[in-house]
Image (spheres, rainbow, N blue to C red):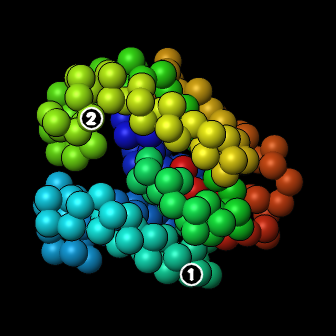
């Protein structure tokens, strides 16, 4: 979910593991030549999800060992959930109240802006969590509750859990998605 610390934790985890870091949201925006809110304004959520799916497939097809920060809504597309089955997927789980405190008024986050489902950011985040949690459970190999963790603590928790998952840090699959 947005505000869980995917990008920051992923960046630090890549350093710890000695792997490249891939921020899917950043790559989607770079490829489009505009911001994610601009993509949503021009193409709607469906257009953004199409772009996100194409990029995810390309990133996961790479043979470079990577830590990938996906967008929180990547799980809403069945094809993406199937693609993630070949990666070690970590769900950075946080309560909607914590996420809302982290994202503030939601500016720059199209699914939280005024008119995107009514209510304030906490209500919209509760709805998104209710809609997505089952998919996160479906794809996650590792779940780390990050409500009370700093980025460094979350990074070390993910690294420790990856070490416990047989083969992921040795010569196993090349990606660890957060």
- Which corner quadrant holds the N terminus? top left
Residue assigned mark 2 = 117
Identified at 36% across, 35% down, the residue is: 3
Percent from the top left, x then y, of residue 94?
A: 50, 27
- Horizontal side of 46 relative to 72 (left or right) equals left
* Residue 49, visible in the rendered structure: yes
Identified at 57% across, 36% down, the residue is: 133
Identified at 41% across, 30% down, the residue is: 127
Say which of 2 and 22 sits in front: 2
- Horizontal side of 89 relative to 70 (left or right) equals right
Say which of 79 and 32 sits in front: 79
Percent from the top left, x then y, of residue 51?
A: 35, 72
Q: Which one is earlier in the sequence, the residue at label 2 or at label 1?
A: 1
Q: Residue furthest right?
A: 166
SS label for mark 2: loop
Residue 56 vertical placement versus 15 (above, below): below
Quarter of the rendering containing residue 31: bottom left
Percent from the top left, x then y, of residue 12?
A: 47, 48
Circle 2 packing at 10 Å, graded few (<14), some (14-19), many (20+), is some
Pointer 2 and pointer 1: residues touching (CB < 8 Å)?
Answer: no
Callout count: 2
Percent from the top left, x then y, of residue 149?
A: 50, 23
Say which of 133 and 58 sits in front: 133
Residue 149 vertical placement versus 92 (above, below): above
Residue assigned mark 1 = 62
For the residues marked 2 and 1, what is the alpha-carbon distance in whole angstroms?
36 Å
- Horizontal side of 9 relative to 122 (left or right) equals right
SS label for mark 1: loop
* Residue 15, visible in the rendered structure: no
Identified at 58% across, 68% down, the residue is: 79
Circle 1 packing at 10 Å, graded few (<14), some (14-19), many (20+), is few
């Amino acid at each position: 979910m947005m505000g869980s610390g995917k990008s920051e934790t992923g960046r630090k985890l890549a350093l710890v593991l000695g792997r490249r870091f891939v921020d899917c949201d950043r790559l989607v925006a770079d490829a489009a030549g505009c911001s994610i809110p601009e993509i949503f304004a021009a193409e709607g959520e469906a257009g953004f999800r199409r772009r996100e799916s194409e990029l995810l497939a390309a990133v996961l097809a790479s043979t470079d060992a990577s830590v990938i920060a996906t967008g929180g809504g990547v799980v809403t597309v069945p094809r993406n959930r199937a693609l993630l089955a070949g990666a070690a997927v970590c769900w950075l789980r946080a309560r909607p109240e914590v996420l809302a405190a982290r994202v503030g008024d939601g500016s720059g986050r199209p699914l939280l802006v005024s008119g995107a489902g009514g209510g304030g950011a906490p209500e919209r985040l509760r709805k998104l969590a209710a809609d997505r949690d089952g998919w996160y459970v479906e794809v996650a190999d590792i779940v780390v509750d990050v409500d009370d963790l700093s980025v460094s603590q979350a990074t070390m928790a993910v690294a420790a859990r990856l070490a416990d998952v047989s083969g992921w840090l040795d010569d196993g699959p090349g990606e660890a998605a957060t």
